[in-house]
Amino acid sequence: QVQLVESGGGLVQAGGSLRLSCAASGNIRSINTMAWYRQAPGKQRELVATITTGGSTNYADSVKGRFTISRDNAKNTVYLQVNSLKPEDTAVYYCNAYRQEYSIIVGMKYWGKGTLVTVSS
């Protein structure tokens, strides 16, 4: 099992920035990819960004150039730096972790409980 705990959400004005953190614990060796998803009110959960153990990253088009995902393997923590925030970025941001082998997800996907980001106009 892997436990994920997010932090860093809050209320920010449009144009502002936040840094979200996700600390992982438990059977860390069972995962090699961590990701951030978000879910806005009344909408489906969507992928924001992913990062592998080796540092390869991928972003949703809607956040490219504004959000940056990074990880500290020594601390088992992944970060999401969110800049130039827009009201439409308002959502609960969830941390996700899993093992991926040759584009196939192996085993369980783990989720945190989320952290709320609210962007005022």
Image: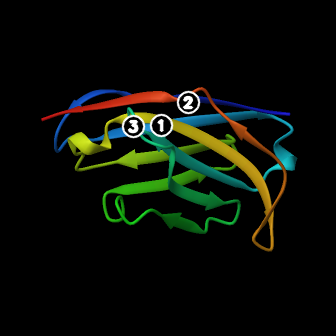
Q: Quadrant of residue 116?
A: top left
Helix, strand or loop at disc 2? strand
Relative horizontal placement of residue 111, taking residue 116 as reference (left or right): right
117 or 20, which is in the foreground?
Answer: 117
The amino acid type of the residue labelled 2 equals Glu
Q: Residue at x 53, y 66 (%)?
A: 58
Cα gap from disc 3 to disc 1, whole angstroms:
9 Å
The amino acid type of the residue labelled 1 equals Tyr
Relative horizontal placement of residue 55, taking residue 2 as reference (left or right): left
Q: Which residue is labeled 3 in the image?
A: 40
Helix, strand or loop at disc 3? loop
Image height of 54 relative to 96, above or below:
below
Q: Which mark is residue 6?
A: 2
106 or 22, which is in the foreground?
Answer: 106
Mark 2 neighbour density, 10 Å: few (under 14) some (14–19) many (20 or more): many
Image height of 90 relative to 85, above or below:
above
Image height of 44 relative to 5, above or below:
below
Foreground label between 2 and 1 = 1
Q: Residue at x 12, y 35 (%)?
A: 121
Mark 3 neighbour density, 10 Å: few (under 14) some (14–19) many (20 or more): some
Q: Which quadrant does the N terminus fall into? A: top right
Proximity of marks 2 and 3: CB atoms separated by less than 8 Å: no
